[in-house]
Amino acid sequence: MDCGGAADASCPEAAESQNPSGLPSVGPSAANQTDRHHSAEPQRDKQAEGNGGQAGGPSSPSTEFRRRKRACDRERIEARHPINFVFENPFGGLFQQMDFVKGLIARHPHHVFLVDTSYCKYDSPYRKSTVFISTLPTFRPKSRCEVIHCKQLVMRGKHDSNVKAQTKAIKNSIPAGLVDLEVTAWKAMYPTEPAYKFLFIDVFTGYGSVAAHIRQAYPDVMVYTNDIVKRTGNNVELDLREFPCYFMMNLALLRFFGNPSLPEMPHGLHAWLRQERIAILFHLSTPCNTYSLDGIGTHRVTSTLTPKTKLAHDHDEMNAKLIEWFEKVCF
């Protein structure tokens, strides 16, 4: 199923303002078109007000154009897919180079987006660069510090701290500003009236920084947390090497929506979620110890992606299955 819905031939500017996916283009041309619309339409609206609400008469083409465009925009928003995902792993590691990740992006170039950034761009005292692979078209973090220096580097010539000096909990925390950007991009995909119900599933919660911030900052978002390690506040401890992600989603829906009779097939699930106006975002800071620069010497055959430990093999198999499942339910 198409995440954004197919472009309607009757929709004005369908070919210009939309990718084939039905999602708004994130390229420079789309931004220019948006700027033109914002600068031109208010003036035409004022002219219309002075003409009894009709710009150029009762059958004004510009008035009809805007009406049809707004209707098409509403239809596209309503057609947005109810399930989205965000993977996160360190920049420079091997995760984004794995065949199952590269294949996902290649098969869905208008639905899956790879972006990178650095934690220091979001008020972290140290630089940790990371990669996000997501289905959120407007999730566009600031450039990595290596590309455009952060304020610390510009003003003081160095970062206030470094990764190795941090506790394990801090090392595995995502800055609140980045979490805000992710949640905002996700919620912006859906109309505000009538309101959607938002369910955030933190698949690899770890020390819980993401879930804790969302619970505090976004009371309208339901948060469900999982980690293989039992920690206070987690909803469940599932090993994703053994349990399918679908099982976790069912537990989350049961937790917040009672006992829904969920259909087995993805299209039936989508229809139910749309009917109930439920949007789900899976956040996956998948374990990086077999993909990061610090771990590949131990877990990978030199200069290759080939696993040489059971843990690396298990992680590859787990992530490949997760991506396979997301392809079934997201596209």
Image: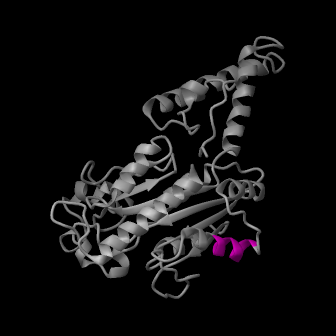
Which residue is painted at 71% across and 21% down in the image? 65
Q: Is residue 227 above or below residue 64?
A: below
Query: Dividing the picture into quarters, in which one does residue 10 lie?
Result: top right
Q: Position of residue 182 (x, y in %)?
A: 50, 57
| Closer-to-camera residue (298/166) | 298
* Residue located 61% across and 69% down the image: 249
Point out the stretch of residues depicted in magenta.
Answer: 250-257
Q: Is residue 256 left or right of residue 86?
A: right
Q: Is residue 242 in the magenta section?
A: no
Q: Quadrant of residue 117?
A: bottom left
* For residue 190, above or below residue 201: above
Task: Please determine whether, in this image, residue 28 is positioned above or below residue 111.
Answer: above
Which residue is pictured at 37% across the width and 71% down the height? 315
**Camera-side residue of 122 and 131:** 131
Q: Position of residue 319 (x, y in %)?
A: 42, 65
Q: Residue 255 in magenta? A: yes
Residue 3 position within the rendered picture, expressed as x and y whole percent measured from the top left: 59, 46
Q: Percent from the top left, x then y, of residue 100?
A: 38, 56
Q: Main secondary structure of the magenta part?
A: helix
In the visual, does 32 lie left or right of 257? left
Q: Nearer the viewer, residue 1 or 215?
A: 1
- Hey, which residue is sitting farthest top in the picture? 56
Residue located 54% across and 33% down the image: 20
